[in-house]
Amino acid sequence: MRTPAARLRLGLRSVFVLLGLLVLLIAGGGLVLFRVYDNQLIRQTEAELVAQGAALASIYRQALLAGLARQAGPAGGAPAVASYGIEVAPAFRSLHDPRLALRPRPAVLSLGSEPIRPTAEPARPPAEPAEPLALAAGATLDQVLRETKRTTLAGLRIVDFRGTVVASSHLELGQSLAHREEVGRALQGEMVSLFRRRVSDQMPPPYSSLSRETGVRVFVALPVVAENRVLGAVVLSRTPMTLGKAFYQDRYSLLAMAAILVAAVLAVSLLAAALIVRPVRALIRQTQAIAAGEAAGLRALAHAGTREIAQLSQSFADMATRLAQRTEYIKGFAASVSHEFKTPLSAIVATAELLRDHGADMTAEERERFVANLGADAQRLTDLVHRVLELARADMMAPGDVRADVGAVIAEVAKSCRAGGMSVETSGAEAAGQARIDGETLAAILRSLADNARQHGGEDVTLHIVARRSGSPPAVAIDFFDDGPGISEANRARVFEPFFTTARDRGGTGMGLTIARALLRACGGTIELAPTEKGACFRVMIPV
């Protein structure tokens, strides 16, 4: 039965769908948070104003030059521009170089980098009246500006070189705008775009209206230049489109796009979930089979979906196989331990009962014999306990970053065997080099093989230890020969079984080879019974 907390947990499919929708929301929220779309709308407004201003500046320049030509008269030649207006400031002269065929004016405004100036100050009375030629040229455009405003809702003004309004879509004709920053910079020859704060006391317009409601207004001022003389300026302003209004205008397209994006996110999320959820559920069933001890848990998934899940499934299968093998080993080992301990324990119990019941009737020699049997059986139990502990330590050993000089270890073991009365011959030990094993562990393994040879071959057995480099990846191979009676075919398959021995009467416990194999397994090595014409040969392989 699932707990309330487990019932509240989301499935992988739900998690994938929620993550996909979250990514979509983050992407949309990022556009709003970083005002990317707002800046695009502002630049669109700026570009529209620049285009209108460039057209009006060109028309005004032609009208003013025509007036100058008429003023010069038929004998005056070219229009007298050199003495009219203000000379372009040196810093902006290159902007009006006539040798440049194209002088595009890109939109540059951004809410993140451009400061918002205060609300535009109203027009002021001029220090001097408007220049007559400029006033006459502006009069030809005054009606054009009013009609243009009705279509674009932009504020349009043309000022002479003193900053006095000579044409306007508003009611500032004859007033001065020279005190405004954008006008002053334009009369120096600079093309200006900037923000000003917008304060409106009117009700917000409906989304369907052309009017716009936002807290800033875009101002653009373009100088009217001829022959490096500023003849005047065109000043334009417009409230940029709001994000909500832009969304409203494109609402049907945006809704369709949102539906497509949501459907795409759901499809991708469900596809990803299918690639993950089904294999994960199969993996859960595999682990449940492992827990139940079923054979299905020992097989990796046939359709894992992804490489990582396939590796995880294979790891589970390998782990289950090793656990099953370990379980079988423990079962067999427990049965062997029970058998090995049962025999001396039964003998001890029987001897103790015999001495208790009939000890008084026995001769001293008989009692001595029974006591000796008790001591021998107790010693055998002690030896068995020690060997079992050694095997447990060997099974629990973890491989470490250790190295042993194989030649030195073989020489030491050969010396100790000779001291015990055994004949030992070695070859190749000096060239064997180092192996990935602790020196004391390797010495214990070789001594165990020597004791095994002595128990089965007697005191006069001769040992031959041959070491060499072998295999790929490289390893150290140690062949441990003896010239004893050898091992029968029936017993060759059982020599590494715990407690199996044919020298029980000579003190053998049947644990020596088992412990040696466990010690070698801990460092990645192996031991096997190799074929030989005489005696027995154990081949030890240790990684380099």
Image: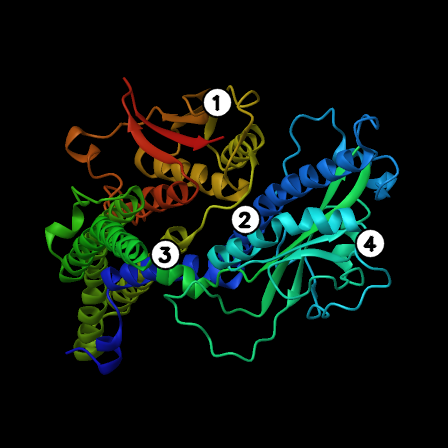
Q: Which residue is mark 1?
A: 425
Q: Can residue 513 be seen here?
A: yes
The amino acid type found where label 1 is placed reads: Glu
Q: Viewer-nearest of labels 3 and 1?
A: 3
Q: CA distance from mark 3 to mark 4?
A: 104 Å
Question: Is residue 12 rendered to the left or right of residue 27?
Answer: left
For the residues bearing labels 2 and 1, Cβ distance under 8 angstroms: no
For the residues bearing labels 1 and 4, Cβ distance under 8 angstroms: no
Give 216 or 233, whichever is nearer the viewer.
Answer: 233
Dot 1 falls on a residue whose secondary structure is: strand
Give 4 or 234, whichever is nearer the viewer.
Answer: 234
Q: Which residue is mark 2?
A: 48
For the residues bearing labels 3 and 1, Cβ distance under 8 angstroms: no
For the residues bearing labels 4 and 2, Cβ distance under 8 angstroms: no
Q: Can residue 385 be seen here?
A: no
Dot 4 falls on a residue whose secondary structure is: loop
Question: Is residue 190 rendered to the left or right of residue 382?
Answer: right
Within 10 Å of disc 2 (Cα), the crowding (few <14, some 14-19, many 20+) is: some
Residue drawn at point x = 82 percent, y = 64 percent: 126
Q: Which residue is mark 4?
A: 162
Q: Viewer-nearest of labels 3 and 2?
A: 2
Q: Could you tell which of marks 4 and 2 lies nearer the N-terminus?
A: 2
The image quarter containing residue 489 is top left
Q: Could you tell which of marks 3 and 2 lies nearer the N-terminus?
A: 2
